[in-house]
Image (cartoon, rainbow, N blue to C red):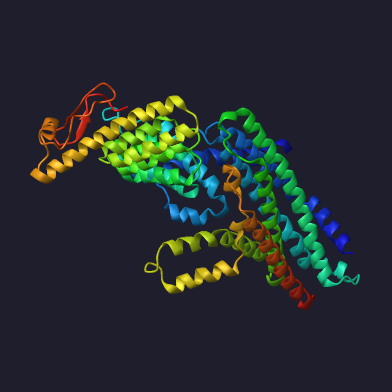
Protein backbone atom coordinates (compact mmCIF):
# COMPACT_ATOMS: atom_id res chain seq x y z
CA UNK A 1 0.00 0.00 0.00
CA UNK A 2 2.85 2.31 0.93
CA UNK A 3 4.62 1.96 -2.42
CA UNK A 4 1.43 3.11 -4.10
CA UNK A 5 1.45 6.31 -2.04
CA UNK A 6 5.05 6.90 -3.14
CA UNK A 7 4.09 6.46 -6.75
CA UNK A 8 1.37 9.10 -6.69
CA UNK A 9 3.70 12.14 -7.05
CA UNK A 10 5.57 10.41 -9.91
CA UNK A 11 2.32 9.60 -11.64
CA UNK A 12 1.00 13.14 -11.23
CA UNK A 13 4.32 14.53 -12.57
CA UNK A 14 4.01 12.31 -15.63
CA UNK A 15 0.41 13.42 -16.17
CA UNK A 16 1.50 17.05 -15.90
CA UNK A 17 4.25 16.58 -18.52
CA UNK A 18 1.88 14.82 -20.95
CA UNK A 19 -0.68 17.57 -20.43
CA UNK A 20 1.70 20.46 -21.08
CA UNK A 21 3.30 18.78 -24.08
CA UNK A 22 -0.19 18.22 -25.52
CA UNK A 23 -1.30 21.78 -24.80
CA UNK A 24 1.83 23.62 -25.96
CA UNK A 25 1.34 23.36 -29.77
CA UNK A 26 -2.37 24.07 -29.38
CA UNK A 27 -1.74 27.12 -27.22
CA UNK A 28 0.92 28.57 -29.51
CA UNK A 29 -0.47 31.11 -31.97
CA UNK A 30 1.26 30.67 -35.31
CA UNK A 31 2.64 33.93 -36.65
CA UNK A 32 2.93 34.95 -40.30
CA UNK A 33 6.21 33.78 -41.83
CA UNK A 34 7.68 37.25 -42.11
CA UNK A 35 7.13 37.77 -38.37
CA UNK A 36 8.99 34.60 -37.48
CA UNK A 37 12.25 36.09 -38.70
CA UNK A 38 13.23 39.20 -36.85
CA UNK A 39 16.47 40.88 -35.95
CA UNK A 40 17.06 43.52 -33.31
CA UNK A 41 18.66 46.82 -34.39
CA UNK A 42 22.46 46.62 -34.37
CA UNK A 43 22.98 49.69 -32.15
CA UNK A 44 20.57 48.37 -29.54
CA UNK A 45 22.46 45.08 -29.47
CA UNK A 46 25.75 46.92 -29.07
CA UNK A 47 24.45 48.51 -25.89
CA UNK A 48 22.55 45.62 -24.32
CA UNK A 49 25.12 42.90 -24.97
CA UNK A 50 27.74 44.79 -22.93
CA UNK A 51 30.78 42.58 -22.43
CA UNK A 52 29.25 39.73 -24.41
CA UNK A 53 29.35 41.56 -27.76
CA UNK A 54 31.76 39.12 -29.37
CA UNK A 55 29.83 36.01 -28.40
CA UNK A 56 26.61 37.71 -29.57
CA UNK A 57 28.31 38.35 -32.92
CA UNK A 58 29.18 34.64 -33.10
CA UNK A 59 25.61 33.64 -32.29
CA UNK A 60 24.16 36.05 -34.88
CA UNK A 61 26.47 34.56 -37.49
CA UNK A 62 25.63 30.97 -36.50
CA UNK A 63 21.94 31.88 -36.64
CA UNK A 64 22.33 33.09 -40.23
CA UNK A 65 24.50 30.13 -41.20
CA UNK A 66 22.16 27.48 -39.82
CA UNK A 67 19.18 29.25 -41.39
CA UNK A 68 20.89 29.18 -44.79
CA UNK A 69 21.73 25.51 -44.30
CA UNK A 70 18.14 24.61 -43.53
CA UNK A 71 16.21 26.84 -45.94
CA UNK A 72 15.89 26.23 -49.62
CA UNK A 73 15.37 29.04 -52.10
CA UNK A 74 12.31 29.13 -54.34
CA UNK A 75 12.62 26.17 -56.78
CA UNK A 76 11.74 28.26 -59.86
CA UNK A 77 13.56 31.51 -59.23
CA UNK A 78 16.42 30.06 -57.17
CA UNK A 79 16.03 33.04 -54.86
CA UNK A 80 14.78 33.57 -51.32
CA UNK A 81 11.83 35.78 -50.43
CA UNK A 82 12.62 39.50 -49.97
CA UNK A 83 11.79 39.36 -46.24
CA UNK A 84 14.19 36.41 -45.88
CA UNK A 85 16.98 38.35 -47.60
CA UNK A 86 16.27 41.31 -45.36
CA UNK A 87 16.49 39.19 -42.22
CA UNK A 88 19.73 37.63 -43.43
CA UNK A 89 21.11 41.09 -44.19
CA UNK A 90 20.15 42.48 -40.76
CA UNK A 91 21.45 39.42 -38.89
CA UNK A 92 24.83 39.52 -40.62
CA UNK A 93 24.95 43.29 -40.21
CA UNK A 94 24.44 42.77 -36.46
CA UNK A 95 27.28 40.27 -36.43
CA UNK A 96 29.68 42.68 -38.16
CA UNK A 97 28.58 45.61 -35.98
CA UNK A 98 29.11 43.65 -32.77
CA UNK A 99 32.52 42.39 -33.86
CA UNK A 100 33.88 44.23 -36.91
CA UNK A 101 36.98 41.99 -36.93
CA UNK A 102 35.00 38.75 -37.36
CA UNK A 103 35.79 37.35 -40.83
CA UNK A 104 33.03 34.78 -41.40
CA UNK A 105 30.00 37.10 -41.65
CA UNK A 106 31.76 39.06 -44.44
CA UNK A 107 32.23 35.83 -46.38
CA UNK A 108 28.58 34.98 -45.92
CA UNK A 109 27.50 38.50 -46.92
CA UNK A 110 29.55 38.15 -50.06
CA UNK A 111 28.37 34.70 -51.05
CA UNK A 112 24.74 34.78 -49.94
CA UNK A 113 23.73 38.40 -50.58
CA UNK A 114 26.17 39.99 -53.02
CA UNK A 115 25.92 37.22 -55.58
CA UNK A 116 22.14 37.16 -55.20
CA UNK A 117 22.30 40.91 -55.84
CA UNK A 118 20.48 41.96 -52.69
CA UNK A 119 21.33 45.50 -51.53
CA UNK A 120 24.66 45.32 -53.38
CA UNK A 121 25.79 48.83 -52.43
CA UNK A 122 25.06 48.41 -48.71
CA UNK A 123 26.48 44.89 -48.56
CA UNK A 124 29.69 45.90 -50.30
CA UNK A 125 30.00 48.95 -48.07
CA UNK A 126 30.04 46.55 -45.10
CA UNK A 127 32.64 44.35 -46.79
CA UNK A 128 34.76 47.44 -47.55
CA UNK A 129 34.43 48.54 -43.91
CA UNK A 130 35.61 45.07 -42.91
CA UNK A 131 38.58 45.48 -45.26
CA UNK A 132 39.43 48.78 -43.56
CA UNK A 133 39.12 47.24 -40.08
CA UNK A 134 41.01 44.00 -40.74
CA UNK A 135 44.19 45.76 -41.80
CA UNK A 136 46.17 42.51 -42.20
CA UNK A 137 43.67 40.70 -44.40
CA UNK A 138 43.90 40.69 -48.22
CA UNK A 139 40.74 38.77 -49.03
CA UNK A 140 38.19 41.37 -47.93
CA UNK A 141 39.74 44.24 -49.95
CA UNK A 142 39.82 41.86 -52.90
CA UNK A 143 36.11 41.06 -52.45
CA UNK A 144 35.30 44.75 -52.05
CA UNK A 145 37.37 45.74 -55.10
CA UNK A 146 35.91 42.98 -57.24
CA UNK A 147 32.34 43.79 -56.19
CA UNK A 148 32.78 47.51 -56.83
CA UNK A 149 33.89 46.73 -60.35
CA UNK A 150 31.71 43.75 -61.24
CA UNK A 151 28.42 44.58 -59.51
CA UNK A 152 28.53 48.32 -58.86
CA UNK A 153 30.48 49.63 -61.86
CA UNK A 154 32.58 51.85 -59.61
CA UNK A 155 36.09 51.81 -61.09
CA UNK A 156 37.62 54.30 -58.64
CA UNK A 157 36.72 52.37 -55.52
CA UNK A 158 37.46 49.05 -57.18
CA UNK A 159 40.97 50.30 -58.00
CA UNK A 160 41.42 51.52 -54.43
CA UNK A 161 40.55 48.17 -52.81
CA UNK A 162 42.37 45.98 -55.36
CA UNK A 163 45.44 48.10 -54.76
CA UNK A 164 45.07 47.54 -50.99
CA UNK A 165 44.60 43.77 -51.56
CA UNK A 166 47.77 43.54 -53.64
CA UNK A 167 49.82 45.21 -50.92
CA UNK A 168 48.73 43.00 -48.03
CA UNK A 169 50.53 39.81 -47.04
CA UNK A 170 49.20 36.85 -49.01
CA UNK A 171 47.65 39.05 -51.71
CA UNK A 172 48.06 37.51 -55.17
CA UNK A 173 50.42 39.47 -57.49
CA UNK A 174 47.64 39.27 -60.08
CA UNK A 175 45.66 41.84 -58.02
CA UNK A 176 48.24 44.40 -59.17
CA UNK A 177 47.45 43.96 -62.81
CA UNK A 178 43.76 43.71 -62.03
CA UNK A 179 43.91 47.08 -60.26
CA UNK A 180 45.69 48.62 -63.25
CA UNK A 181 43.14 47.16 -65.66
CA UNK A 182 40.28 48.48 -63.59
CA UNK A 183 41.86 51.94 -63.54
CA UNK A 184 42.31 51.81 -67.33
CA UNK A 185 38.73 50.69 -67.90
CA UNK A 186 37.50 53.41 -65.58
CA UNK A 187 39.16 55.92 -67.92
CA UNK A 188 42.00 56.61 -65.53
CA UNK A 189 44.98 55.66 -67.67
CA UNK A 190 47.31 58.14 -65.94
CA UNK A 191 46.41 56.60 -62.61
CA UNK A 192 46.99 53.09 -63.95
CA UNK A 193 50.42 54.17 -65.34
CA UNK A 194 51.45 55.76 -62.04
CA UNK A 195 50.33 52.67 -60.15
CA UNK A 196 52.17 50.28 -62.47
CA UNK A 197 55.34 52.40 -62.32
CA UNK A 198 55.31 52.03 -58.55
CA UNK A 199 54.76 48.27 -58.86
CA UNK A 200 57.67 47.97 -61.31
CA UNK A 201 59.85 49.88 -58.85
CA UNK A 202 58.82 47.55 -56.02
CA UNK A 203 59.41 44.42 -58.15
CA UNK A 204 62.87 45.75 -59.13
CA UNK A 205 63.77 46.43 -55.49
CA UNK A 206 62.59 42.97 -54.45
CA UNK A 207 64.50 41.34 -57.32
CA UNK A 208 61.39 39.73 -58.83
CA UNK A 209 62.62 39.68 -62.40
CA UNK A 210 59.76 37.78 -64.04
CA UNK A 211 57.13 39.93 -62.39
CA UNK A 212 59.08 43.07 -63.25
CA UNK A 213 59.17 42.14 -66.96
CA UNK A 214 55.49 41.35 -67.01
CA UNK A 215 54.63 44.65 -65.33
CA UNK A 216 56.94 46.60 -67.63
CA UNK A 217 55.23 45.11 -70.68
CA UNK A 218 51.84 46.15 -69.32
CA UNK A 219 53.19 49.59 -68.47
CA UNK A 220 54.53 50.03 -72.00
CA UNK A 221 51.10 49.18 -73.45
CA UNK A 222 49.39 51.67 -71.18
CA UNK A 223 51.88 54.40 -72.09
CA UNK A 224 51.18 53.80 -75.80
CA UNK A 225 47.47 54.01 -75.07
CA UNK A 226 47.98 57.24 -73.13
CA UNK A 227 49.85 58.72 -76.06
CA UNK A 228 46.95 57.93 -78.41
CA UNK A 229 44.43 59.23 -75.83
CA UNK A 230 46.32 62.55 -75.81
CA UNK A 231 45.88 62.81 -79.58
CA UNK A 232 42.19 61.88 -79.29
CA UNK A 233 41.67 64.62 -76.69
CA UNK A 234 43.38 67.16 -78.99
CA UNK A 235 41.12 66.03 -81.88
CA UNK A 236 38.02 66.44 -79.71
CA UNK A 237 39.05 69.95 -78.80
CA UNK A 238 39.38 70.86 -82.49
CA UNK A 239 36.24 69.18 -83.82
CA UNK A 240 34.06 68.71 -80.71
CA UNK A 241 33.58 65.05 -81.57
CA UNK A 242 35.71 61.93 -81.26
CA UNK A 243 37.67 60.70 -84.30
CA UNK A 244 36.27 57.75 -86.22
CA UNK A 245 39.62 55.99 -86.62
CA UNK A 246 43.26 56.34 -85.59
CA UNK A 247 44.23 57.17 -89.18
CA UNK A 248 42.48 60.53 -88.83
CA UNK A 249 44.92 61.38 -86.04
CA UNK A 250 48.00 60.58 -88.13
CA UNK A 251 46.62 62.43 -91.18
CA UNK A 252 46.15 65.59 -89.10
CA UNK A 253 49.62 65.20 -87.57
CA UNK A 254 48.25 64.82 -84.04
CA UNK A 255 49.98 61.45 -83.89
CA UNK A 256 53.26 60.82 -85.78
CA UNK A 257 52.56 57.10 -86.22
CA UNK A 258 50.15 54.65 -84.68
CA UNK A 259 52.17 53.01 -81.88
CA UNK A 260 52.86 49.31 -82.12
CA UNK A 261 50.86 47.23 -79.65
CA UNK A 262 53.53 45.47 -77.50
CA UNK A 263 51.47 42.27 -77.13
CA UNK A 264 51.24 41.68 -80.88
CA UNK A 265 47.75 43.10 -81.45
CA UNK A 266 46.77 46.52 -82.73
CA UNK A 267 45.12 49.61 -81.29
CA UNK A 268 41.74 50.88 -82.47
CA UNK A 269 39.03 53.31 -81.37
CA UNK A 270 35.71 52.00 -80.06
CA UNK A 271 32.44 53.83 -80.92
CA UNK A 272 32.79 55.99 -77.77
CA UNK A 273 36.21 57.19 -78.87
CA UNK A 274 38.11 55.10 -76.31
CA UNK A 275 41.42 53.53 -77.26
CA UNK A 276 41.27 49.73 -77.25
CA UNK A 277 43.56 46.87 -78.17
CA UNK A 278 42.64 43.81 -80.21
CA UNK A 279 44.59 41.81 -77.60
CA UNK A 280 43.25 41.41 -74.08
CA UNK A 281 45.22 43.77 -71.82
CA UNK A 282 46.44 41.23 -69.29
CA UNK B 1 44.28 39.41 12.30
CA UNK B 2 43.77 40.76 8.76
CA UNK B 3 45.32 37.62 7.34
CA UNK B 4 43.15 35.40 9.54
CA UNK B 5 39.93 37.12 8.41
CA UNK B 6 41.00 36.92 4.78
CA UNK B 7 41.86 33.22 5.11
CA UNK B 8 38.56 32.42 6.88
CA UNK B 9 36.66 34.26 4.15
CA UNK B 10 38.53 32.30 1.50
CA UNK B 11 37.74 28.97 3.23
CA UNK B 12 34.12 30.04 3.74
CA UNK B 13 33.91 30.77 0.03
CA UNK B 14 35.44 27.41 -0.85
CA UNK B 15 32.87 25.64 1.35
CA UNK B 16 30.07 27.33 -0.55
CA UNK B 17 28.58 24.79 -2.95
CA UNK B 18 27.79 27.55 -5.44
CA UNK B 19 31.51 27.78 -6.29
CA UNK B 20 31.53 24.17 -7.45
CA UNK B 21 28.31 24.64 -9.38
CA UNK B 22 29.70 27.71 -11.12
CA UNK B 23 33.00 25.94 -11.91
CA UNK B 24 31.07 23.02 -13.36
CA UNK B 25 28.98 25.41 -15.47
CA UNK B 26 32.15 27.09 -16.79
CA UNK B 27 33.63 23.66 -17.57
CA UNK B 28 30.51 22.66 -19.51
CA UNK B 29 30.54 25.95 -21.44
CA UNK B 30 34.14 25.35 -22.42
CA UNK B 31 33.33 21.83 -23.57
CA UNK B 32 30.55 23.35 -25.63
CA UNK B 33 33.19 25.65 -27.16
CA UNK B 34 34.91 22.65 -28.74
CA UNK B 35 31.57 21.44 -30.16
CA UNK B 36 30.61 24.84 -31.58
CA UNK B 37 34.02 25.31 -33.21
CA UNK B 38 33.14 22.63 -35.75
CA UNK B 39 30.30 24.82 -37.05
CA UNK B 40 32.48 27.81 -37.91
CA UNK B 41 33.77 28.36 -41.45
CA UNK B 42 37.07 30.21 -41.00
CA UNK B 43 37.52 32.16 -37.77
CA UNK B 44 37.42 29.05 -35.56
CA UNK B 45 40.06 30.29 -33.11
CA UNK B 46 38.28 33.60 -32.67
CA UNK B 47 34.94 31.98 -31.84
CA UNK B 48 36.58 29.51 -29.44
CA UNK B 49 38.34 32.39 -27.66
CA UNK B 50 35.09 34.37 -27.44
CA UNK B 51 33.30 31.42 -25.86
CA UNK B 52 36.14 30.61 -23.46
CA UNK B 53 36.59 34.21 -22.28
CA UNK B 54 32.84 34.85 -22.06
CA UNK B 55 32.48 31.69 -19.95
CA UNK B 56 35.26 32.93 -17.66
CA UNK B 57 33.63 36.38 -17.32
CA UNK B 58 30.23 34.86 -16.64
CA UNK B 59 31.58 32.42 -14.05
CA UNK B 60 33.58 35.12 -12.26
CA UNK B 61 30.52 37.38 -12.25
CA UNK B 62 28.38 34.61 -10.74
CA UNK B 63 30.94 34.09 -7.96
CA UNK B 64 30.74 37.78 -7.03
CA UNK B 65 26.94 37.77 -7.15
CA UNK B 66 26.23 34.45 -5.44
CA UNK B 67 29.21 33.91 -3.16
CA UNK B 68 30.70 37.33 -2.41
CA UNK B 69 27.40 39.03 -1.67
CA UNK B 70 26.11 36.09 0.39
CA UNK B 71 29.12 36.07 2.72
CA UNK B 72 28.90 39.71 3.75
CA UNK B 73 25.11 39.95 3.70
CA UNK B 74 24.86 36.83 5.86
CA UNK B 75 27.25 38.42 8.33
CA UNK B 76 24.88 41.36 8.66
CA UNK B 77 21.61 39.44 8.58
CA UNK B 78 22.65 36.64 10.96
CA UNK B 79 24.68 39.01 13.16
CA UNK B 80 27.77 36.78 12.86
CA UNK B 81 29.72 40.01 12.42
CA UNK B 82 29.50 40.42 16.22
CA UNK B 83 31.72 37.38 16.70
CA UNK B 84 34.63 39.12 15.00
CA UNK B 85 33.96 42.62 16.26
CA UNK B 86 33.61 41.45 19.88
CA UNK B 87 37.27 40.37 19.71
CA UNK B 88 38.26 44.01 19.37
CA UNK B 89 38.90 43.76 15.65
CA UNK B 90 38.73 47.23 14.09
CA UNK B 91 35.82 47.47 11.68
CA UNK B 92 38.04 48.70 8.87
CA UNK B 93 40.31 45.69 9.25
CA UNK B 94 37.35 43.34 9.29
CA UNK B 95 35.99 44.78 6.03
CA UNK B 96 39.37 44.86 4.27
CA UNK B 97 40.03 41.30 5.45
CA UNK B 98 36.73 40.17 3.99
CA UNK B 99 37.60 41.90 0.72
CA UNK B 100 41.04 40.29 0.56
CA UNK B 101 39.56 36.86 1.26
CA UNK B 102 37.06 37.26 -1.56
CA UNK B 103 39.82 38.57 -3.83
CA UNK B 104 41.84 35.45 -3.02
CA UNK B 105 38.85 33.24 -3.81
CA UNK B 106 38.33 34.99 -7.14
CA UNK B 107 42.04 34.75 -7.98
CA UNK B 108 41.93 30.99 -7.37
CA UNK B 109 38.83 30.67 -9.55
CA UNK B 110 40.33 32.79 -12.35
CA UNK B 111 43.47 30.65 -12.26
CA UNK B 112 41.31 27.56 -12.64
CA UNK B 113 39.36 29.19 -15.49
CA UNK B 114 42.61 30.22 -17.17
CA UNK B 115 43.82 26.62 -17.13
CA UNK B 116 40.45 25.45 -18.53
CA UNK B 117 40.42 28.19 -21.24
CA UNK B 118 43.99 27.46 -22.29
CA UNK B 119 43.31 23.70 -22.45
CA UNK B 120 40.16 24.34 -24.53
CA UNK B 121 41.97 26.66 -26.94
CA UNK B 122 44.93 24.32 -27.33
CA UNK B 123 42.53 21.48 -28.10
CA UNK B 124 40.72 23.61 -30.70
CA UNK B 125 44.09 24.59 -32.18
CA UNK B 126 45.02 20.93 -32.39
CA UNK B 127 41.73 20.08 -34.11
CA UNK B 128 41.68 23.00 -36.57
CA UNK B 129 45.27 24.23 -36.97
CA UNK B 130 44.61 26.00 -40.29
CA UNK B 131 41.67 27.98 -38.96
CA UNK B 132 42.98 29.02 -35.56
CA UNK B 133 43.78 32.49 -36.89
CA UNK B 134 45.83 34.98 -34.94
CA UNK B 135 44.56 34.12 -31.45
CA UNK B 136 47.19 35.05 -28.90
CA UNK B 137 47.43 32.80 -25.85
CA UNK B 138 49.36 35.34 -23.84
CA UNK B 139 46.64 37.89 -24.56
CA UNK B 140 44.14 35.29 -23.32
CA UNK B 141 46.12 35.22 -20.04
CA UNK B 142 46.08 39.02 -19.94
CA UNK B 143 42.32 39.01 -20.59
CA UNK B 144 41.87 36.77 -17.53
CA UNK B 145 43.92 39.20 -15.44
CA UNK B 146 41.59 42.02 -16.52
CA UNK B 147 38.52 39.91 -15.73
CA UNK B 148 39.97 39.46 -12.25
CA UNK B 149 40.55 43.20 -11.96
CA UNK B 150 36.94 43.99 -12.80
CA UNK B 151 35.71 41.39 -10.33
CA UNK B 152 37.80 43.02 -7.56
CA UNK B 153 36.09 46.28 -8.40
CA UNK B 154 32.65 44.68 -8.47
CA UNK B 155 33.33 42.98 -5.11
CA UNK B 156 34.25 46.34 -3.57
CA UNK B 157 31.01 47.78 -4.94
CA UNK B 158 28.97 44.85 -3.65
CA UNK B 159 30.46 45.43 -0.17
CA UNK B 160 29.45 49.06 -0.31
CA UNK B 161 25.94 48.15 -1.44
CA UNK B 162 25.57 45.52 1.29
CA UNK B 163 26.18 48.26 3.85
CA UNK B 164 23.53 50.60 2.46
CA UNK B 165 20.95 48.05 1.29
CA UNK B 166 18.33 46.56 3.55
CA UNK B 167 18.70 42.96 2.31
CA UNK B 168 21.01 40.74 0.31
CA UNK B 169 18.49 40.74 -2.56
CA UNK B 170 18.74 44.53 -2.89
CA UNK B 171 22.54 44.24 -2.80
CA UNK B 172 22.37 41.61 -5.55
CA UNK B 173 20.11 43.86 -7.63
CA UNK B 174 22.29 46.96 -7.19
CA UNK B 175 25.49 45.05 -8.01
CA UNK B 176 23.98 43.44 -11.11
CA UNK B 177 22.60 46.77 -12.36
CA UNK B 178 25.93 48.51 -11.78
CA UNK B 179 27.73 45.82 -13.74
CA UNK B 180 25.24 46.02 -16.62
CA UNK B 181 25.34 49.81 -16.77
CA UNK B 182 29.12 49.93 -16.33
CA UNK B 183 29.57 47.49 -19.21
CA UNK B 184 27.49 49.65 -21.58
CA UNK B 185 28.19 53.29 -20.72
CA UNK B 186 31.13 53.49 -23.12
CA UNK B 187 29.00 52.20 -26.04
CA UNK B 188 26.12 54.52 -25.17
CA UNK B 189 28.50 57.49 -24.99
CA UNK B 190 29.97 56.56 -28.39
CA UNK B 191 26.51 56.22 -29.92
CA UNK B 192 25.37 59.57 -28.53
CA UNK B 193 28.53 61.25 -29.82
CA UNK B 194 28.21 59.68 -33.27
CA UNK B 195 24.50 60.57 -33.52
CA UNK B 196 25.36 64.27 -33.89
CA UNK B 197 24.24 67.28 -31.89
CA UNK B 198 20.75 67.76 -33.37
CA UNK B 199 19.24 64.33 -32.74
CA UNK B 200 19.88 64.03 -29.01
CA UNK B 201 18.51 66.37 -26.36
CA UNK B 202 21.07 68.09 -24.08
CA UNK B 203 19.41 66.51 -21.00
CA UNK B 204 20.03 62.98 -22.34
CA UNK B 205 23.62 63.91 -23.19
CA UNK B 206 24.18 65.23 -19.70
CA UNK B 207 22.67 62.10 -18.18
CA UNK B 208 24.93 59.87 -20.27
CA UNK B 209 28.00 61.94 -19.37
CA UNK B 210 27.04 61.72 -15.70
CA UNK B 211 26.56 57.95 -15.88
CA UNK B 212 29.85 57.60 -17.76
CA UNK B 213 31.84 59.24 -14.97
CA UNK B 214 29.78 57.94 -12.03
CA UNK B 215 29.57 54.24 -12.91
CA UNK B 216 32.73 52.19 -13.29
CA UNK B 217 33.68 51.66 -16.92
CA UNK B 218 33.87 47.87 -17.05
CA UNK B 219 34.42 47.92 -20.83
CA UNK B 220 38.00 49.00 -20.10
CA UNK B 221 38.68 45.55 -18.67
CA UNK B 222 37.21 43.67 -21.62
CA UNK B 223 40.04 42.29 -23.79
CA UNK B 224 38.07 39.57 -25.59
CA UNK B 225 38.33 41.09 -29.07
CA UNK B 226 42.02 41.92 -28.55
CA UNK B 227 42.85 38.33 -27.55
CA UNK B 228 40.58 36.68 -30.13
CA UNK B 229 42.07 38.60 -33.08
CA UNK B 230 45.59 38.99 -31.71
CA UNK B 231 45.28 42.78 -32.01
CA UNK B 232 48.11 45.08 -31.02
CA UNK B 233 47.79 46.30 -27.45
CA UNK B 234 48.43 49.74 -26.15
CA UNK B 235 50.43 49.05 -23.00
CA UNK B 236 50.03 52.62 -21.74
CA UNK B 237 46.25 52.57 -21.90
CA UNK B 238 46.17 49.06 -20.39
CA UNK B 239 48.36 50.28 -17.54
CA UNK B 240 46.01 53.18 -16.97
CA UNK B 241 43.03 50.78 -17.05
CA UNK B 242 44.60 48.80 -14.22
CA UNK B 243 45.31 52.03 -12.38
CA UNK B 244 41.71 53.14 -12.93
CA UNK B 245 40.41 49.86 -11.52
CA UNK B 246 42.73 50.09 -8.57
CA UNK B 247 41.80 53.73 -7.84
CA UNK B 248 38.07 53.03 -8.13
CA UNK B 249 38.29 49.93 -5.90
CA UNK B 250 40.26 51.81 -3.23
CA UNK B 251 37.78 54.70 -3.32
CA UNK B 252 34.74 52.41 -3.04
CA UNK B 253 36.29 50.28 -0.30
CA UNK B 254 37.25 53.41 1.65
CA UNK B 255 33.66 54.74 1.46
CA UNK B 256 32.47 51.29 2.59
CA UNK B 257 34.85 51.44 5.58
CA UNK B 258 33.54 54.90 6.53
CA UNK B 259 29.94 53.68 6.31
CA UNK B 260 30.73 50.52 8.26
CA UNK B 261 32.39 52.53 11.05
CA UNK B 262 29.33 54.76 11.36
CA UNK B 263 26.83 51.95 11.13
CA UNK B 264 24.99 51.10 14.29
CA UNK B 265 25.01 47.39 14.78
CA UNK B 266 22.04 46.44 16.89
Image-based side of B98 in relation to A219, left or right: right
Residue B237 vertical placement versus A210 (above, below)? below
Q: Residue at x 74, y 53 (%)?
A: B106
Residue B102 vertical placement versus B162 (above, below)? above
Residue A67 vertical placement versus B213 (above, below)? above
Outermost residue toward the right in this view: B87
Image-quadrant location for residue A2: top right
Image location (x, y in percent) of residue A200: 41, 34
Image location (x, y in percent) of residue A176: 39, 34
Q: How many marks can you see?
A: 0
Q: Residue at x 34, y 44 (%)?
A: A157
| Image quarter hosting the N terminus of chain A | top right
Image location (x, y in percent) of residue A22: 48, 38
- Residue A160 seen in this snapshot: yes
B233, A238: nearer the viewer: A238
- Residue A8 seen in this snapshot: no
Image-quadrant location for residue B169: bottom right
Image-based side of A180 in relation to B102, left or right: left
A105, A31: nearer the viewer: A105
Q: Residue at x 70, y 51 (%)?
A: B145
Image location (x, y in percent) of residue B8: 85, 57
| Image quarter hosting the C terminus of chain A | top left
Amino acid sequence: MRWRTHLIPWFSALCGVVLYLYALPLATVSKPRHEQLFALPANLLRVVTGQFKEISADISFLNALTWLGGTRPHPETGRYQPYQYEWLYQTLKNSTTLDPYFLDPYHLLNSALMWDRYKEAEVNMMIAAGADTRTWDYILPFFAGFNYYYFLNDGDRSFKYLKIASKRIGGHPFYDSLAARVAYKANKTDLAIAYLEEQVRQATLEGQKFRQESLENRLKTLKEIRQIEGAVEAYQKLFSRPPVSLDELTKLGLLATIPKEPNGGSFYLDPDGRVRSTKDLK
Amino acid sequence: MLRAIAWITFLEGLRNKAVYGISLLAGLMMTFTVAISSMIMRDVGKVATDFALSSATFAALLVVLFVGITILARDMERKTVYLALSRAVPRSRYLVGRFLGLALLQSALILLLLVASSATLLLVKQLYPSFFGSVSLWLVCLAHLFILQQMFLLTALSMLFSLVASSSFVTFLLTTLTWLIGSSTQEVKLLIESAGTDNISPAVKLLVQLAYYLFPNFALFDLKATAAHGLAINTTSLGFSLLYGLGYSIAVLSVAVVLFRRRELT
